[in-house]
Image (cartoon, coloured by chain):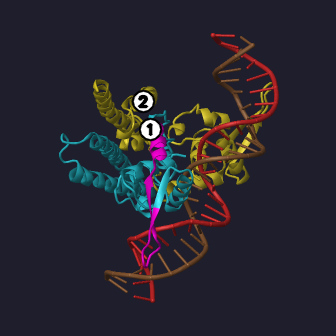
Chain colours: A cyan, B yellow, C red, D brown
DNA sequence: TGCAGCATGTAAATAGTTACATGATTAT
DNA sequence: ATAATCATGTAACTATTTACATGCTGCA
């Protein structure tokens, strides 16, 4: 269970509600740890029970009251311990790679179409990272230690997305070629 | 449930046992879809019940008999349908990125050590891919369509690992600098 | 009138991990 | 002796997804 730690990390940077964690106003962690709102609400409840987070109810006249969570001392301690502990790389589950591995069994055109959907998603992720780079990290040398840590993570996102897109370009060219060959038959 | 399709894909290329699927004698799918043996055995049972795979018992004098699975016509049809269907990118759950995002909260040395563990794992993955490249894909131009598909997947693995390692190099340099700064205090 | 955004959750189902269980063979 | 490899599985637990449930506001 590491959603727990992703939430602790996000809340440690800025107190926020479950809804905000899901939508990520302060950005970025969402890009490194996927979770649904349902999961987040459940986890927030458990983190509250464990005393790692506390919330203050902010009553609103019309809407349900906002529960703004912030981290406690023991939450911060737990987070620190987790950061310093050994971790395993996350298990790889790459459906597109499996598809390509046996791509010869299917028609190239639908596979190419699916690849293009993925390309769009990766491109918009990259665009988001590049925006953040310009907005918050224009002056790379003047960054605080905190800033440098966050910039490194952003760079990771950009490097990985660019590598993915470079691969996808070759894959798309090959699939287009397969589709053309099929058309000729 | 896409372990199902990863297994169908692996078995379609070569009939094999659950144990072999776990250890991956024919290689590669393991690198794109993580699963424990327990999960594989369970899924094989279900795929058998659904008629997508069948197995033949190969009795062995001393050991438990090997159940060699191969794909059925309806399994092949299901696999083809899945390849041609839309798919979503797998959810990202990158604990190391989360750690780095709030890296300023912890001591740099243990974090650096954890990063280095990850580097070793990624390096050995890359080495595995490079071996496979030399062994099976030395003559890239003479590849069959099947071969080209599999080569593309291997290239994906290599590109992504190299990008990851390039990032890790920068991250390690920064953490080493943090550690040195701490040492001076 | 209908949809998107804000704001909270519960319940049921599926997917995945960890622990337990068995037993022979071969290498150190 | 002890561990690793081959070979199968079950049971309990944890994590994640999907479906259900509520209700107000503002925009097109």
Instruction: Examine the rendering and report whether any part of residue B17 can be seen.
Output: no
* Residue assigned mark 2: B110
**What residue is shown at x 52% (from left), y 49% (from top)?**
A105
Residue positioned 64% across, 33% down in the render: B20
In front of the other: B118 or A3:
A3
Q: Secondary structure at mark 2?
A: helix
Residue B60 percent across, percent down from the top left: 78, 28
Q: Nearer the viewer, residue A174 or B97?
A: B97
Badge 1: how crowded within 10 Å, few (<14), some, or many (20+)? Answer: many
- In the image shown, does B30 or A36 lie closer to the viewer? A36
Marks 1 and 2 belong to one chain:
no
Where on the picture, by quarter, is residue A127?
bottom left
Q: Position of residue B107 (x, y in %)?
A: 38, 33
> Image point 28% across, 28% down: which residue?
B181
Name the image quarter holding the C terminus of chain A: bottom left
Segment colored magenta: A56-83
| Relative image position of residue A156 (x, y in whole percent) | 33, 42
Residue B75 location (% of width, % of height): 63, 52
State the separation of the CA atoms marked 1 and 2.
8 Å
């Amino acid at each position: 269970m590491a959603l727990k730690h992703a939430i602790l990390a996000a809340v440690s940077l800025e107190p926020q509600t479950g809804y905000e964690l899901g939508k990520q106003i302060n950005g970025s962690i969402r890009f490194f740890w996927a979770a649904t709102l349902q999961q987040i609400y459940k986890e927030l409840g458990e983190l509250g029970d464990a005393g790692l987070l506390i919330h203050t109810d902010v009553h609103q006249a019309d809407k349900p009251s906002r529960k703004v969570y912030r981290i406690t001392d023991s939450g911060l301690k737990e987070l620190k311990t987790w950061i310093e502990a050994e971790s395993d790389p996350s298990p790889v589950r790459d459906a597109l790679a499996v598809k390509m591995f046996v791509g010869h069994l299917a028609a190239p055109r639908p596979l190419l179409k699916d690849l293009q959907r993925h390309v769009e998603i990766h491109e918009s992720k990259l665009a988001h990272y590049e925006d953040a780079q310009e907005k918050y990290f224009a002056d790379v040398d003047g960054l605080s230690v905190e800033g440098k840590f966050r910039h490194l993570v952003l760079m990771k996102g950009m490097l990985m997305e660019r590598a993915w897109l470079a691969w996808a370009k070759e894959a798309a060219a090959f699939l287009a070629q397969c589709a053309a060959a099929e058309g000729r038959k």
